[in-house]
């Protein structure tokens, strides 16, 4: 579904990505793991278009989308659950969700998307009129995932959804991510530092210093002492 | 006597304050969305004043009817300056956009000087006055006040009830979040700059209905300064905060004028200005997020 080939990007004169190759197959959870500063977030942002591409290409469903602006990519069905949530804190939960259905394609499915999100996260229905900024971290993460679902995506990229959450909430978030795959058939690219993301994944990439250092299914990664010690710390 | 004078002046202050507030909304909108301080703000007010003056004097068009013309001209100027200058500087240091908006202000002043000379001009609409006993209110001022409230209300409704307005609000709150929703953030930047300038030029028209004299290419400077005080009063990034900031400022300006005039040997007009800026300093020290911000 998503194919990243020799992607190079960065901020101004500072290059971060040095040509990683990565593929996300439809209907799978692909995890991208690696230490802080490895370039994982930059890769997601470059795929979505908020960080300029310096070289290489991004293919979505076989189509070259490398230089497409972000909003056009959202139209095609790519979205991101950004690191640090980036909610509209002064808006209510409902308003946040509605903003997710901003594009024409998503607006057509607005009501069914809302229904889906409220069934996944009943608490969001109870609190739909609450300002999102006043909710707990876990609930805010649910709103962020919900808002991404409202865009009617085919591929959701998630940037460290477990960050800063209590272990119990982290488990819930990972369970939800697996549900999204199994029950709705979504394709997910999951960026994590948390090695628990290994268990949810169908395929794993290990990134370090802007390049892919290792890849394989979760068992292979777990069984490679070198990868575990060098990049995962488990 | 003094109370009669004070209540009269305070009423005038509220009315002038409403127009001040409207004249600051554009500045706050642009700062809220783009984080750009429009130092050339007053020059766009000046452009609006000339729109009212020229339309009235050459075509006999009543100043309120100049508002749509001012809005369209302002929005067009906003788009022009956004795409030629501001857009490229957004990612640069703050000083870059500050110098750019300063330069735009100077360019507007000099172009207007070439077109209309630097001589101060005025117009006489000749509407009647409303006599309240303790003070006299020209209808033109009341229309300017009503127009300001209407514009503020429309902006509020647009921001809260329409899809396009909500999109702009989401960019104010979090542009990265807006991006992942598929909102074209670049376009929202251009649009908010354009609307901000449009509102400012409109406020120039309304201000001439208040003060129909002294229209000259360099009249904007004092409005820029006042707008900064008002914007800080209202919490800088909030257009409605700016509106209420304007009301407060109008009250304080007129109220302090009356009181300073009671002290022999003081020049009340200069003291008013001094007092406004003391107020700005005090607010920045005590409540840098603005008087009306709850956070």
Image (cartoon, helix red, strand yellow):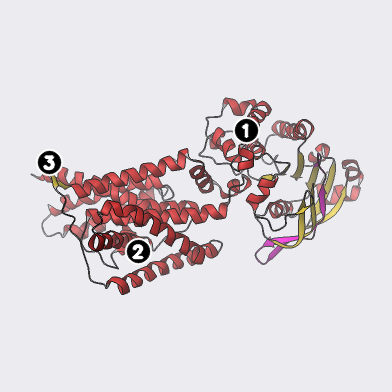
Asked if labels 2 and 3 share a chain, the reply is yes
**Gap in angstroms between the C-alphas marked 2 and 3:** 35 Å
Q: Which mark is residue B132?
A: 3
Identify which residue, B286 or B228, lies in the foreground.
B228
Give coordinates of residue B40: x percent, y percent.
Answer: 39, 63
Q: Tag count in the figure?
A: 3
Residue B52, horizontal then vertical, whole percent: 28, 58
Quadrant of res A149 = top right
For the C terminus of chain B, the quadrant is top left
Crowding around mark 2 (Cα neighbors within 10 Å: few <14, some 14 to 19, many 20+) is many
Which one is in front in this view, the residue at disc 1 or the one at disc 3?
A: 3
Q: Secondary structure at mark 3?
A: loop
Q: Which region of the structure is painted magenta? A: A8-29
Does residue A173 appear to the left or right of A130 in the view shown?
A: right
Mark sitting earlier along the chain (2/3): 2
Query: Is A14 one of the magenta-colored residues?
Result: yes
Residue nearest the observer in this picture, B179 or A139: B179
Which numbered marker is on residue B43? 2
Mark 2 residue element: helix
Which numbered circle lies on residue A139?
A: 1
């Amino acid at each position: 579904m998503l194919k990243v080939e020799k992607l190079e990007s960065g901020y101004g004169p500072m290059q971060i990505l040095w040509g990683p190759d990565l593929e996300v197959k439809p209907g799978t959870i692909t995890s991208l793991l690696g230490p802080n500063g490895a370039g994982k977030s930059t890769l997601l942002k470059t795929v979505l278009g908020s960080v300029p591409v310096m070289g290489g290409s991004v293919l979505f469903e076989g189509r070259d989308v490398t230089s497409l602006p972000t909003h056009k990519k959202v139209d095609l069905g790519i979205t991101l659950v950004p690191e640090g949530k980036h909610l509209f804190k002064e808006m209510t939960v409902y308003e946040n969700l509605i903003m997710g259905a901003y594009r024409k394609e998503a607006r057509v499915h607005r009501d069914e998307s809302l229904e889906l999100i409220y069934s996944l996260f009943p608490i969001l229905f109870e609190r739909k009129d609450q300002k999102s900024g006043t909710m707990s971290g876990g609930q805010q993460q649910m709103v962020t995932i919900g808002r991404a679902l409202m865009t009617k995506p085919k591929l959701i990229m998630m940037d460290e959804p477990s960050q800063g959450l209590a272990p119990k909430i982290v488990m819930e978030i990972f369970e939800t991510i697996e549900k999204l795959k199994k029950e709705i058939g979504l394709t997910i690219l999951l960026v994590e530092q948390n090695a628990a993301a290994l268990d949810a994944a169908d395929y794993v990439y290990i990134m370090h210093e802007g390049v892919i250092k290792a890849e394989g299914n979760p068992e292979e990664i777990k069984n490679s002492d070198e990868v575990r010690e060098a990049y995962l710390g488990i | 006597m003094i109370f009669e004078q004070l209540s009269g002046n305070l009423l005038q202050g509220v009315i002038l304050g409403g127009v001040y507030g409207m004249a600051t909304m554009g500045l706050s909108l642009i700062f809220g969305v783009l984080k750009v301080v429009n130092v050339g703000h007053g020059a766009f007010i000046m452009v609006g004043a000339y729109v009212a003056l020229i339309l009235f004097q050459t075509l006999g068009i009543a100043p309120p009817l100049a508002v749509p013309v001012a809005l369209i001209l302002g929005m067009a100027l906003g788009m022009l300056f956004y795409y030629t200058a501001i857009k490229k500087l957004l990612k640069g240091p703050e000083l870059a956009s500050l110098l750019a908006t300063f330069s735009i202000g100077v360019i507007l002043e000099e172009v207007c000087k070439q077109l209309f000379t630097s001589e101060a001009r005025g117009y006489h609409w000749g509407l009647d006055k409303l006599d309240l006993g303790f003070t006299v209110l020209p209808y033109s001022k009341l229309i300017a006040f009503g127009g300001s409230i209407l514009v503020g209300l429309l902006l509020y409704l647009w921001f809260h009830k329409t899809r396009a307005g909500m999109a702009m609000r989401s960019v104010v709150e979090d542009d990265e979040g807006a991006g992942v929703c598929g909102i074209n953030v670049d376009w929202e930047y251009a649009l908010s700059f354009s609307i901000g300038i449009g509102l400012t030029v409109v406020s120039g028209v309304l201000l001439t209905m208040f003060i129909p004299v002294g229209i000259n290419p360099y009249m904007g400077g004092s409005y820029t300064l006042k707008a900064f005080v008002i914007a800080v009063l209202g919490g800088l990034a909030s257009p409605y905060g700016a509106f209420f900031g304007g009301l407060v400022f109008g009250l304080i300006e007129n109220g302090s004028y009356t009181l300073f005039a009671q002290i022999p040997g003081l020049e009340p007009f200069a003291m008013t200005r001094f007092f406004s800026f003391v107020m700005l300093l005090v607010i920045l020290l005590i409540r840098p997020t603005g008087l009306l911000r709850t956070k």
